[in-house]
Image: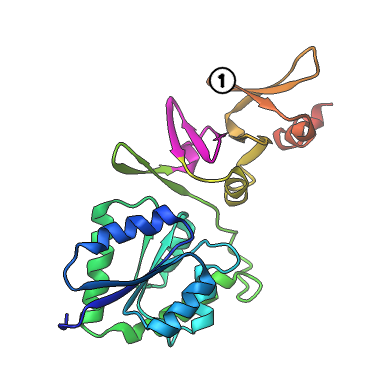
Amino acid sequence: MSSEPLRVLIVDDEPLARQRLEDLLSDRDGVEIIGQVGSGKQAVEAIREERPDLVFLDVQMPEMTGFDVVRAIGPEAMPPTIFVTAYDQYALTAFDVAALDYLVKPFDDDRFEQAFERACELIRMRKVSVMTDKLLSLLQEARGPAVSPRPTTAPRYLERIAVEMRGQVRVVPVERIDFITASGPYAELHVGEETFIIRERMQTLEERLDPDRFFRIHRSAIVQLDRVEALLISGGGDYAVRLKDGRRLQVSRSRKEELEQRLGLDALG
């Protein structure tokens, strides 16, 4: 790279995520962090005013997503961007259209290094101009069927979830998840005898999991339907499901009827 420092902008609505990127960048020679912002609106302002060389851009932010930021700036004026996402369907979309790179939270140091070095190489070789068409393609993907109809393509749901444990990042295929339970601001993924903890809301997970395979049986529990062996009714009128491995989960009374339909039990009545 030239003698000029690489000017980097960090955009993420989570303070810990911004701090993580700052820690990875702060001790590098030739890198200057020109700002950290926590919203899409602030990102648009910072990009227009500061003109960074590289942007780490969170995809999921309230009110204005990372894709909205790209739309506001315009793909032709957007600096080289590494997308950051908690959900692999966004990352795969970015990857499919050959965007600069992406990081799936939680990412390890090696994956960050790979993305950062790739970005530096592209900037060094002045190949950034190819980003325009790629970002245009990415925005087209992000708009969904209302703009780019794909009648033969099913909606994309989560296929894998990245989890961090004991300093390592593991990717859990959702098909292996038996059920998910809420634990304060976290969600626990139950996979056989293992439990993985991620920081995510149950509502968000419910929306991103295939409804043909998963059902929210209680405000604090989502179950994979093919893991259910029986619907249990107690003398007091409470409900539960028994999974094939013998574990039991409470079922909300308000969700019992729909669960019966999903399990095909209504046809037996």
Q: Nearer the viewer, residue 105 or 40?
A: 40
Instruction: Tell me the chief SS of the magenta region.
Output: strand
Q: Nearer the viewer, residue 136 or 53?
A: 53
Q: Does residue 141 appear anywhere in the picture?
A: no
The percent position of residue 138, horizontal first and vertical second, equals 48, 74
Colour scheme employed for the rendering of this structure: rainbow
Q: Residue at x 32, y 73 (%)?
A: 8
Which residues are drawn in magenta? 173-197
Q: Nearer the viewer, residue 38 or 74?
A: 38
The percent position of residue 239, horizontal first and vertical second, equals 73, 22
- Residue 7 in magenta stretch: no
- Position of residue 175 in the picture relative to residue 34 (left or right): right
- In this view, the residue farthest toward the right is 269
- Position of residue 231 in the picture relative to residue 36 (left or right): right
Residue 151 position by quadrant? bottom right
Q: Residue at x 35, y 79 (%)?
A: 52
Read off the residue under disc 1: 247
Quadrant for the N terminus in the image:
bottom left
Q: For the residue carrying disc 1, how many other residues have a C-alpha within 10 Å: few (<14), some (14-19), or many (20+)?
A: few
Q: Nearer the viewer, residue 131 or 153?
A: 131
Q: Residue at x 53, y 81 (%)?
A: 72
Q: Is residue 75 above or below residue 238?
A: below
Q: Residue at x 49, y 40 (%)?
A: 175
Q: Is residue 194 above or below residue 65?
A: above
The percent position of residue 84, horizontal first and vertical second, equals 41, 62
Residue 252 position by quadrant? top right
The percent position of residue 176, horizontal first and vertical second, equals 47, 37
- Position of residue 208 in the picture relative to residue 107 (left or right): right
Q: Amino acid at mark 1?
A: Arg
Q: Does residue 172 appear anywhere in the picture?
A: yes
Q: Secondary structure at mark 1?
A: loop
